[in-house]
Amino acid sequence: MDSLIKSWGGEEVIIRHDQATGAWILIAIHSTRLGPAAGGTRMKSYPDFGAALQDVLRLSEAMTYKFAVPGIARGGGKAVINLPAPFDPDLRRGLLRSYGSLVKQLGGVYYTGPDVGTSSVDMNIIAETGSPYVFGRTPDAGGAGDSGPITALGVFAGIQ
């Protein structure tokens, strides 16, 4: 694990264990050179902690390039919430609120939104404790809603 982080070349990795759920929360800040880091929150069960760490490092680096190439004033970041298997869905809300508190503690170094395993409704819950550093909330909560169609349009434009 130590060599993986050292060879990654990013700025910071934050790792927290949520005692109430047994989940691991990992936030990777790859770069803040162009602005605060931003990236989605991926929530799923990984085969092991190493796989979750490898995923968050890789994804945060990809976000750096995703923002840098078009000149967007954001850096690369990503979060992974590694759920224990099995995971009790009744604990989801508390876990998301705990994660939101962690995002807020970072003080604007990292902004997050939905990714695999999270939704706009989840972003509403995260924002309860993580605002103003949460995007992709539902329209009734002041957000833009589901980012899926815009993401698909961007992918399609890139293919063309």
Image: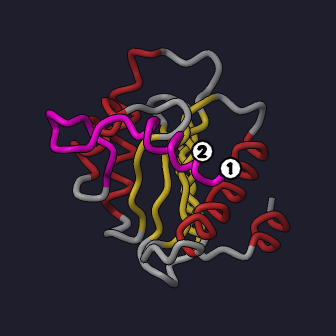
The answer to whether 33 is drawn above or below residue 40 in the figure is below
Pick whichever, 5 or 61, lies toward us.
61
Circle 1 crowding by C-alpha within 10 Å: few under 14, some 14–19, many from 20: few
Q: Residue furthest bottom?
A: 33
Relative horizontal placement of residue 40, taking residue 65 as reference (left or right): left
Report the magenta residues as a range. Answer: 134-160
| Residue at 73% from the left image edge and 76% from the top image edge | 9
The number of numbered discs placed on residues in the rendered structure image is 2
Contact between marks 2 and 1 (CB within 8 A): the answer is: yes
Pick whichever, 101 or 20, lies toward us.
101
Relative horizontal placement of residue 83, taking residue 51 as reference (left or right): left
Q: Position of residue 42 (x, y in %)?
A: 55, 40
Pick whichever, 119 or 110, lies toward us.
119
Q: Which residue is mark 1?
A: 159
| Residue at 61% from the left image edge and 36% from the top image edge | 82
Q: Residue furthest right?
A: 3
Residue type at tag 2: Phe
Q: Which mark is residue 42?
A: none
The answer to whether 89 is drawn above or below residue 53 in the figure is above
Residue type at tag 1: Ile
| Residue at 30% from the left image edge and 37% from the top image edge | 145
Quarter of the rendering containing residue 47 = top right
Q: Position of residue 51 (x, y in %)?
A: 77, 43
Relative horizontal placement of residue 16, taking residue 131 as reference (left or right): right
Alpha carbons under labels 2 and 1: distance apart: 5 Å
Q: Residue furthest front?
A: 160
| Residue at 53% from the left image edge and 72% from the top image edge | 70
Give SS at disc 1. Answer: helix
Q: Position of residue 120 (x, y in %)?
A: 34, 34
Q: Which residue is mark 2?
A: 156
- State the quadrant of the N terminus: bottom right
